[in-house]
Image (cartoon, rainbow, N blue to C red):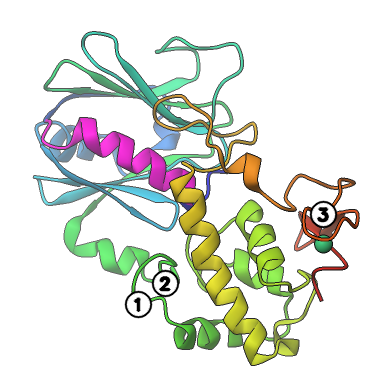
Amino acid sequence: MPELPEVETIRRDLARVLIGQKVVDFKADKPRLLRSPLKLYKIKLVGATILSVKRRAKLLLFELSSDYVLIIHLKMTGQLVWRSQVGKVRSGGHPIQGVDQVPNKFTYITLKLSSGGKLFFNDVRQFGYWQLIPKRDLLRQLQHYGPEPLARNFSLNEFSRRLGRHANTTIKSALLNQTVVAGLGNIYVDETLFAARVRPIRKVSSLKNKETMAIHQAIIKILKKAVAARGTSFNTYVDAKGRSGSYWRVRYVYGRPGQKCLKCGQVIKRTIIAGRGTHYCASCQK
Ligand SMILES: [Zn+2]
């Protein structure tokens, strides 16, 4: 699943081509990917101008001139492909092996924009969704998400307070919980805990203050680096220009089981924590 850096990369790429455009047509072949009634898209999305493209956690938010917000979650295999009238293509999300034209058999939603370009939503496994909500309901809709880790208000105090609600779980599980901090997934949690030198199996209650501080700092450092690298590609993601993110080349533990730790030379281990494949160095992480 794309995590914060990947969704942020897609957001930036799509913002460049979509802001200021008017939606002139909307077509959905799989109504179950829509979390709002079909007719609402015809009324509030068609005819509206896209004012901004924002992100909260792993959600893309398209602010519309109709005072509604279109929410798109790519989930496991969603992909957004923009094709301009002259055929220039930008896509972001899950690449589909062997399928490079749009629309294709996995294209379930199509938006036509005033420039003549189209935005296609492809989703092999159909876990993604589109939702349309009034702008005034947005805060309430998003209130269960924890702080944005790259926002200024992501303080150590707030992070510790939220972690404290999960004292009896593992730190791996707590960091995957979107109410503690928004936007982290399996890859960046493993990388964060390596950078903070904390083993993923550790109980939250066992963390010393300086370890909590190191994790807080590592979250920010790792995510900034990953956004700058346009995310990580691991089967399930290409950026909105169809390119792989380069973070994959600079990762330390994720997806490297059996290989040597780049810091100490010990073999990277893999185990299952919180139901997720988890990678760590037993020598660097305590
Ligand atoms: Zn090591």
Left or right for 1, reference 64? right
Report the disc number at residue 94. none
Q: CA distance from mark 1 to mark 2?
A: 8 Å
Question: Looking at the rendering, which quadrant does residue 188 occupy?
Answer: bottom right
Q: CA distance from mark 2 to mark 3?
A: 31 Å
What residue is shown with label 3? 261
N-terminal label among 2 and 3: 2
Residue visible at 36% across and 71% down in the picture: 143
Mark 1–mark 3 CB contact (< 8 Å): no
What residue is shown with label 1? 153
Query: Does the residue tagged 3 have its C-beta within 8 Å of any atom of ligand 1?
Result: yes
The amino acid beneath tag 1 is Asn
Mark 1–mark 2 CB contact (< 8 Å): yes
What residue is shown with label 2? 147
Residue visible at 48% across and 39% down in the picture: 128
The amino acid beneath tag 3 is Cys
Instruction: Tell me where the magenta segment starts and ends, as one range.
Output: 5-21
